[in-house]
Image (cartoon, grey):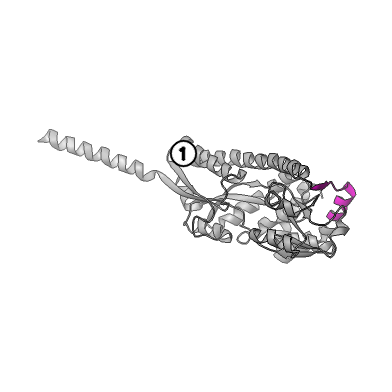
């Protein structure tokens, strides 16, 4: 009887240990704002989930594409913070973390080297801003430069005057207004019809972005580097902290590597799309150094006004970025 009792007790201990081990396994719900599986962003997120499955001990992530869950794009940060989803790529987070918009200011960041310096200066502010939402900031990937595409001939900033340009943020709107244009806000699905009917005369986007779909309505591409768009990769803080230290470190490494790969893939696609659009008849115009400097000078006061209106923390963050950029 003793042996039976001992065997039963041992079995219960083993089963209990197994159950405890399985309880530690985390099956996260992942989400991305993009509904197009062929984009560099979605392919990169898929690589993250595949690597997590194979490289971590107790974490798996099931990725859902944009619009497959009942989450508005502007609510992704909140959905992660509330634990409705555990992990996401979030392009539309600036309403929840407004300080992040410093990296979107027009003419502040001229190229990839500038971006790296500015991003490093902003990283602590991004981590803090997301932390206040119950979210852990893991990293980001950026899209190619947002440049000017038009249906009218353009080879100077002066040509924007009296034209209606579709923008995706108030900051882009400030750029358009600085040179006499009228900014118009439209969803991406509205752009082709608006261009065809003359509701708008141009857009701010990337060759590998909106121009990939709208190029037939756009005859000119003035490659003035207006600003950058970027997507945060985030996790619910409670879910993240429940992971083992080893899995947290592995996840952070995977995200760091794959967000860099996404950014690089976008840049490759940008050059390919630009070449394809030129071959299809689009006129590509490179701005002079003088035009770039003129645009930077025109928008510099806007950067300061924007930060001043937003508050002291934004002013300090902007100053940190300007110092990093040597401006």
Up/down of 115 relative to 304, above or below:
above
Up/down of 50 relative to 196, above or below:
above
Q: Residue at x 63, y 39 (%)?
A: 261
Side of 255 relative to 118 (left or right): left
Any part of residue 246 in sight: yes
Residue 319 pos. (x, y %): 76, 54
Side of 160 relative to 25 (left or right): right
Q: Residue at x 88, y 47 (%)?
A: 288
Region rendered in magenta: 282-295
Residue most extreme to the left: 1
Disc 1 is placed on an element classified as helix
- In this view, the residue in front, 141 or 313, is 141
Residue 316 pos. (x, y %): 72, 57
Side of 6 relative to 52 (left or right): left
Q: Quadrant of residue 58?
A: top left
Residue most extreme to the top: 3
Q: What residue is disc 1 on?
A: 53
- Quadrant of the rendering where the N terminus is positioned: top left
Up/down of 50 relative to 164, above or below:
above
308 inside magenta stretch: no
Q: Residue at x 88, y 59 (%)?
A: 158
290 inside magenta stretch: yes
Q: Residue at x 54, y 39 (%)?
A: 47
- In this view, the residue in front, 284 or 94, is 284
Residue 222 pos. (x, y %): 81, 51
Side of 198 relative to 32 (left or right): right
Any part of residue 307 in sight: no
């Amino acid at each position: 009887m003793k042996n039976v009792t001992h065997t039963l007790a041992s079995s219960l201990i083993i089963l209990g240990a197994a159950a405890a081990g399985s309880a530690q396994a985390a099956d996260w719900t992942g989400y991305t704002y993009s509904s197009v599986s062929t984009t560099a962003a979605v392919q990169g997120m898929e690589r993250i989930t595949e690597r997590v499955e194979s490289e971590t001990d107790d974490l798996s992530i099931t990725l859902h594409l944009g619009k497959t869950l009942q989450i508005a794009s502007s609510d992704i940060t909140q959905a992660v913070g509330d634990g409705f989803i555990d992990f996401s790529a979030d392009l539309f987070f600036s309403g929840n973390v407004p300080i992040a918009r410093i990296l979107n200011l027009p003419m502040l960041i001229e190229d990839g080297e500038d971006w790296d310096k500015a991003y490093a200066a902003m990283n602590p502010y991004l981590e803090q801003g997301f932390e206040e939402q119950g979210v852990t900031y893991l990293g980001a990937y950026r899209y190619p430069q947002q440049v000017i595409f038009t249906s009218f001939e353009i080879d100077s900033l002066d040509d924007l005057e009296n034209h209606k340009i579709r923008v995706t943020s108030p900051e882009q709107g400030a750029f358009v207004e600085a040179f006499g244009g009228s900014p118009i806000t439209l969803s991406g699905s509205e752009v082709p019809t608006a261009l065809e009917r003359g509701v708008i005369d141009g857009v701010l986007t990337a060759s590998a972005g909106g121009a990939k779909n709208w190029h037939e309505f756009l005859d000119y591409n003035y490659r003035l580097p207006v600003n950058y768009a970027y997507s945060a990769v985030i996790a619910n803080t409670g879910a993240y902290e429940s992971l083992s230290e080893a899995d947290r470190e592995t996840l952070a490494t995977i995200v760091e590597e794959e967000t860099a790969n996404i950014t690089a893939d976008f840049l490759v696609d940008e050059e390919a799309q630009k070449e394809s659009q030129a071959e299809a008849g689009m006129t590509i115009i490179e701005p002079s150094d003088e035009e770039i400097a003129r645009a930077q000078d025109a928008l510099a006061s806007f950067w300061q006004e924007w930060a001043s209106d937003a508050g002291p923390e934004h002013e300090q963050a902007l100053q940190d970025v300007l110092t990093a950029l040597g401006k």
